[in-house]
Image (cartoon, rainbow, N blue to C red):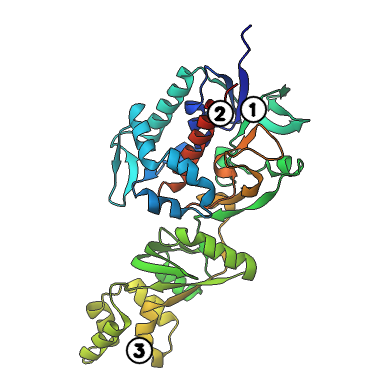
Amino acid sequence: MINSKKTISIIGGGASALMFACSIDTSKYNVTLFEKNKTLGRKFLVAGDGGLNLTHSENSAQFVKRYIPNDFILAALEQFSNRDFINWLSSIGVETFVGTSKRVFPKKGMKPIDVLSLIIERIKRKNVNIKTEFIWKGFEENDLVFRNENNKYVVKSDITIFALGGASWKITGSAGDWLHFFSEKGISVNPFYPSNCAYKINWTEAILKQISGKPLKNCVFTCQNKSIKGEAVLTEFGIEGSGIYPLSPQIRKQIIQNKRTNIFIDLKPDLSQEELIKRFIENSNLSIKDILEKKINLSQVQIILIKNITTKEDYLNSEVLSHLIKTFPLELVDFSDMDEAISTVGGIALDEVSDTFELYKLPNNYCIGEMLDFDAPTGGYLLQANFSIGNFVATKLNELKL
């Protein structure tokens, strides 16, 4: 007598769920994917609006350091690295290239919808059953409850893969409104907070008119003991950009604890403070403005920022100015709304899942992707984590002897 195949229910249609569905052995399992939206991968498409940054090309040793914490993802990244992902994409017809920032994108002319379509085509060829507009409404005992239009469905599943996402970009269905379903089961969950987001600065009206929308380029941004070289944009709300996003864990912790934090900006990272002082001395026949503009090459917005926090006396003091150029302070007092963040932290506490992402308190139930409480910077790292974890869990289930 041939045993019937075990059933797997995937809840969610984001990156991690899609990779799991692509990787699971459907000769071994009957697989159904439940998605709350009308279509799969809505957040994947929104993330690709400005160019679909699939992953990053840096070496594995550096790659894993981008995650906070990172021990939970080591095995997944070792099994399905950024190089493995690039090769896998090629196998389904998605050729990629490495941009100047070392980020990896689909080849020119290929849109996010084209990439998503090829992934979904692979899933369909594996005979995964896809049910859209099925909203997960929690548990009934240990069975799954869904709502489809006005109908209630109770689904019994041998194995459940939860891929519910975080709490940013609600328009995509990523609302983070599922936390209580797990806490009611005694599973520890952490509240969501924005990550990779804008941070609020209490600008004065006078300076805001001069700096709003202006960039800070080729600077080094520091919060606590972490420094990042990059760019940022000054806005009416405050500051955001590639130089700020990787500092999110440090900034967020301080704002939660103290309602504010300071970051420090090295406006001229290629010049030491001693060299700056030397240039002031050597060009003492020029005005301070000319020295800053022509000999130190500060931008207009950088000079405006410095003048805004100096007295007339300090503005004429080369040592004070040199110090400010190297450690310009900005006070951040809040983060942007969660829905405006690129990603979030919070969700299922990592100590609630095993090294294969199975919930200790709910055997045969797995949590994957952004619903887990970890931090990843922009640059393709979050997508890579989602795809790596999805592939990893599918591979572990494929290896089980049933």
| Along the line of sight, the residue nearer the viewer: 342 or 202 | 342
First in sequence: mark 1 or mark 3?
1
Residue 72 horizontal/vertical position (percent): 54, 48
Residue occupying the point 66% across, 52% down = 191
Label 2 SS: helix
Mark toward the viewer: 1 or 2: 2
Q: Is residue 238 visible?
A: yes
**Which is more foreground, mark 1 or mark 3?**
1
Residue to which mark 2 is pinned: 397
The type of residue carrying mark 1 is Ile
Image position, residue 106 (x, y; %): 33, 37
Q: Which residue is mark 3?
A: 319
Residue type at the position of mark 3:
Glu
The number of numbered badges drawn on the structure is 3
- Identify the mark at residue 159; answer none if there is no mark: 1
Could you give the CA–CA distance between mark 1 and mark 2, rounded to whole angstroms? 10 Å
Sequence-first disc among 1 and 2: 1
Mark 3 or 2: in front is 2
Residue 290 in percent (x, y) is at 25, 82
Q: Residue at x 39, y 52 (%)?
A: 61
Q: In the displayed structure, does residue 127 sit left or right of residue 2?
A: left
